[in-house]
Image: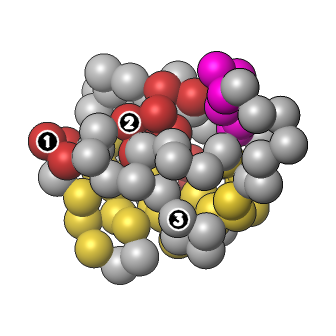
């Protein structure tokens, strides 16, 4: 079963994503939209990091960035930028 965009908020933790490993605490955060919800993330973060921060690593997800599907094989190389619009759909098994 797929959880659509409207229902995904109940399944994603509400967090402000920050780079805890960053040596510069004064870096300016970039703003993203994830399933219509504003979030902040440190500059230089990639899609794999976002999914990790959302506790979605290893789960069956589909990600759309600015209207284009991102293949799973490109999550680590897909850097996030200010103003990115992301849609994340999580596949949930069950009957």
Mark number for residue 62?
A: none
**Judging from the image, what secondary structure is the residue with disc 1 in?**
helix
Q: Residue at x 77, y 47 (%)?
A: 27
Residue 35 location (% of width, % of height): 58, 61
How is the model colour-coded?
secondary structure
Residue under numbered circle 3: 81
Q: Is residue 49 above or below residue 55?
A: below
- Distance of mark 2 from mark 1, alpha carbons? 10 Å
> Around disc 1, counting alpha carbons within 10 Å, would you say few (fewer than 14), some (14 to 19), or many (20 or more)?
few
- Distance of mark 1 from mark 3, alpha carbons? 19 Å
**Judging from the image, what secondary structure is the residue with disc 2 in?**
helix
Q: Is residue 19 visible?
A: yes
Nearest-to-viewer mark from 1 and 3: 3
Q: Is residue 52 left or right of residue 17?
A: left
- Quadrant location of the C terminus in the rendered image: top left
Mark before the other along the chain sequence, 1 or 3: 1
- Distance of mark 3 from mark 2, alpha carbons? 14 Å
Mark before the other along the chain sequence, 3 or 2: 2
Residues in magenta, as a range: 17-22
28 inside magenta stretch: no
Residue under numbered circle 2: 48
- Quadrant location of the N terminus in the rendered image: top left
Q: Is residue 11 visible?
A: no
Residue under numbered circle 1: 73
């Amino acid at each position: 079963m797929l959880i659509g965009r409207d229902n995904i908020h109940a399944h994603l933790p509400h967090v402000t994503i920050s780079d805890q490993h960053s040596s510069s605490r004064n870096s300016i955060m970039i703003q993203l939209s994830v399933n219509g919800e504003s979030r902040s993330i440190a500059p230089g973060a990639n899609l794999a990091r976002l999914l990790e921060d959302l506790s979605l690593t290893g789960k069956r997800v589909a990600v759309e960035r600015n209207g284009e599907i991102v293949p799973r094989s490109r999550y680590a190389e897909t850097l996030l930028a200010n103003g990115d619009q992301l849609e994340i759909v999580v596949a949930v098994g069950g009957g």
